[in-house]
Amino acid sequence: MSLKRFNFDEPESNLRRCEKCGKALPRRYIYDICEQCEHDAMYKDVKEYIMKNNVTELEVADHFHLPLETIQRWIKEGHLSYKKN
């Protein structure tokens, strides 16, 4: 999920701040939070979705418009787990 959306080489006067962590963001950046905070929020939503629904990895990836490899990596790294039946 490392999407390049902006250029950090802009002058400091053109920067604004992430609403969650305060990290500098260029004025032309279209979101109010930085990529890391966006990633953290998505991870939390994915985890809650898995806990509330009986879904496969592919269904989770489709629901959140994430690459299947991202979901699989989070599981492999131990960040996500599925309910035991």
Image (cartoon, grey):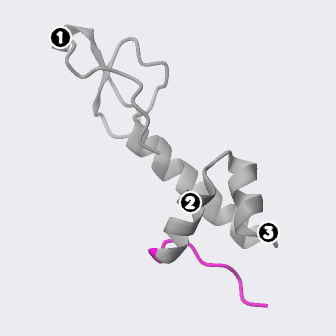
Q: Secondary structure at mark 3?
A: loop
Q: Residue at x 42, y 25 (%)?
A: 5
With 79 as the anchor, is 46 left or right in this view?
right
Image coordinates of residue 18 in percent, x first then y, are 37, 31
The answer to which of marks 2 and 3 sits earlier in the sequence is 3
Amino acid carrying mark 2 in the image: Glu
Q: Point out the stretch of residues depicted in magenta.
A: 77-85
The numbered disc on residue 11 is 1
Q: Nearer the viewer, mark 2 or mark 1?
A: 2
Relative depth, front residue between 83 and 16: 83
With 51 as the anchor, is 53 left or right in this view?
right
User: Magenta segment: does it hold 81?
Assistant: yes
Q: Is residue 72 above or below residue 41?
A: below
The numbered disc on residue 3 is none
Please give the residue where the numbered disc 3 appears in the rendered image: 55
Q: Is residue 4 above or below residue 35?
A: above
> Residues at badges 1 and 3 in contact (C-beta under 8 Å)?
no
Separation of residues labelled 2 and 3 (CA atoms): 16 Å
Q: Residue at x 60, y 51 (%)?
A: 67
Q: Secondary structure at mark 1?
A: loop
